[in-house]
Amino acid sequence: MVDVIKDLSVFFPGQVLSGQQVSAKYSVDWSGESAHTPDIVVRAKTVFDVSKLLAFCNKSSLPIVTQGGMTGLSGGSTPQGSEIVLSLELLSGITDVDVESMTITALAGTPLEQLQQAANDVGFYLPLDLGARGSCTIGGNVATNAGGNQVLSYGMTRALVLGLEAVTADGTVIRSMNKMLKNNAGYDLKQLFVGSEGTLGVVTEVVLRLYPKPLTKQSALCGFSNFSQVVSFLQYMQRNFSRVTTFELMWDNYVKQVRQMNQQLMPVLADDHSFYVLIEIEGNDPARDDDCFNWKLQACLDAGLLNDAVVAQSERDVNRFWQLRDGVIDILAKVKYRANFDIGVPISQMASFVHTVEVELVASFKNLQLCTFGHMADGNLHIIAWTGREDDVDSIYERVYTLVGTVGGTITAEHGIGTMKRQYLSLCRSEQEIDLMRALKKAMDPNNILNPGRVI
Ligand SMILES: Cc1cc2nc3c(=O)[nH]c(=O)nc-3n(C[C@H](O)[C@H](O)[C@H](O)COP(=O)(O)OP(=O)(O)OC[C@H]3O[C@@H](n4cnc5c(N)ncnc54)[C@H](O)[C@@H]3O)c2cc1C
């Protein structure tokens, strides 16, 4: 390792950290799993740095792990063994805003929030949004095909990426900076890198699609006594509004847990409910949209599709609603030994699935605590379960993932496989699918230097 540090320090003067210079932030992502301090961190500033590093490592079969904002929840960017960390924190900045083509282009290490702000500054809108927006990077979002709060209307990151630049394992730079909605000239190579979690290449720059900024936005927090009401309400709102952007469902166990952890959080609705939904609608008619939203909610109340609703009257109200949904950050920060799921389950099976999980886990684990919430309209649920005992965590994972397999769901709807879910991949992907993934990996990274041990 001493020789490698010497060589890299010559290639990248002032950009290599080793020994005491390596701070804890490079040791583990937000999953908190298996922290490991790397021997070497290389902080790339340009695509040429990335290319040079990969070519060097490929030649000597030295493994690399790529790090963006480290907000991932699957252990993908946590270093293992002798892996060299390739940090993209200095490869940051917006390189182009094309108002006529409605695109924004940025280097991979740019925090998502900076892109949102830059789009907003020119009167446009980047609809990719997630709780980690201040720290996660656009390269990490692309690598994980991040979902977030507005997938229902705008799709996942994949739907917003028009072009990108990536570096393959041998250091080749693939520049595919398409700005058009349509381009059928051969294989759509960018999609190989979207969602491949850094195993097929390192994303260095991204072109994203922008939307016109909506003129109005309405938000409401609604209460329900049963799941079929929630489904009927979702379908009613989708029939009546062209842009239902957010439909965040919270089970009562989640709301109780968040309130317990943050006692400052005042209840929004007068009574307790079995389910809560944070719904947001976008529109373009300032004269009518507020009234229309209120009428439709009233119609739902009258028809028994929901039990209660509070409509936001100000930005402060909106923030209060989101504090409840973003309360998951307190749970992640305070609960130490937890199984943290981001599974996908068909909506038709969701209620019975959650019930089965609850019954099975409560019967099998002493002192089980559980909370359930998520981007329900995308078929994506988060379940956090814990007993206070580290030994139980793996068994909880295994039990729930096995149940996911039986209902044709996915073990990860948005956070990705990383290292933590790799052993369960076959529960939701066929042997043939996994073989094809392996063949792609072998073709693009024959020496297995890019994020080894992640995904497959
Ligand atoms: C509070 C909170 C809320 C979250 N909410 C959501 C949510 O709603 N939806 C969602 O999908 N996720 C969510 N996440 C998870 C996380 O924010 C996303 O996965 C995000 O896209 C990761 O970006 P990052 O820059 O932090 O990547 P990192 O954590 O640094 O890396 C993630 C993976 O991508 C690889 N990688 C990173 N950058 C590159 C690159 N340039 N090229 C190739 N590979 C790369 C890494 O090696 C690793 O495998 C949340 C996380 C937190 C902490």
Image (cartoon, rainbow, N blue to C red):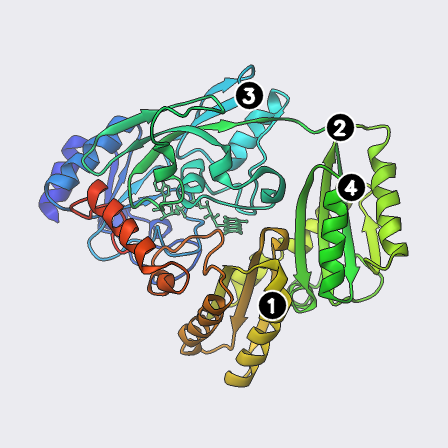
Q: Which of 388 and 127 is in front in this view?
A: 127
Label 2 C-beta lies within 8 Å of the nearest ligand 1 atom: no
Residue 238, percent across and down?
Answer: 72, 44
Q: Residues within 10 Å of mark 3 (few under 14, many from 20)?
A: some
x, y percentage for residue 200?
28, 42
Closer to the camera in the image, 119 or 16: 119
Residue bearing the label numbered 2: 284
> Which type of secondary structure does the marked residue at label 1 adopt?
strand
- Per the image, label 3 sits on a secondary structure element best described as loop
Q: Does the residue labelled 1 lie within 8 Å of ligand 1?
A: no
Residue at screen point 79% across, 56% down:
268
Task: Give the distance between the C-alpha atoms of the residues marked 2 and 3, in whole angstroms.
Answer: 18 Å
- Which mark is first along the chain, 3 or 1? 3
Callouts 3 and 4 close, C-beta under 8 Å = no
Of the numbered discs 2 and 1, the one sitting upstream in the chain is 2
Which tag is nearer the camera, tag 1 or tag 3? 3
Going from N to C along the chain, the mark reached first, 4 or 1, is: 4
Contact, mark 2 vs mark 3 (Cβ under 8 Å): no
Q: Please state which amino acid type lies under the numbered disc 1.
A: Cys
Horizontally, residue 417 falls left or right of residue 237, namely left
Foreground residue among 67 and 217:
217
Q: Are marks 2 and 1 in contact (CB under 8 Å)?
A: no
Q: In which quarter of the image is residue 214?
A: top right
Considering only order in the chain, which callout, 4 or 3, is on the residue closer to the N terminus? 3
Q: Which residue is under mark 4?
A: 240
Q: Which amino acid does label 2 sit on?
A: Asn
Q: Tag 3: residue type?
A: Met
Q: Mark 3 points at which residue?
A: 102
Q: How far apart are marks 4 and 1 (CA)?
A: 31 Å
Q: Which residue is drawn at 39% across and 33% down?
A: 108
Q: Mark 1 points at which residue?
A: 371
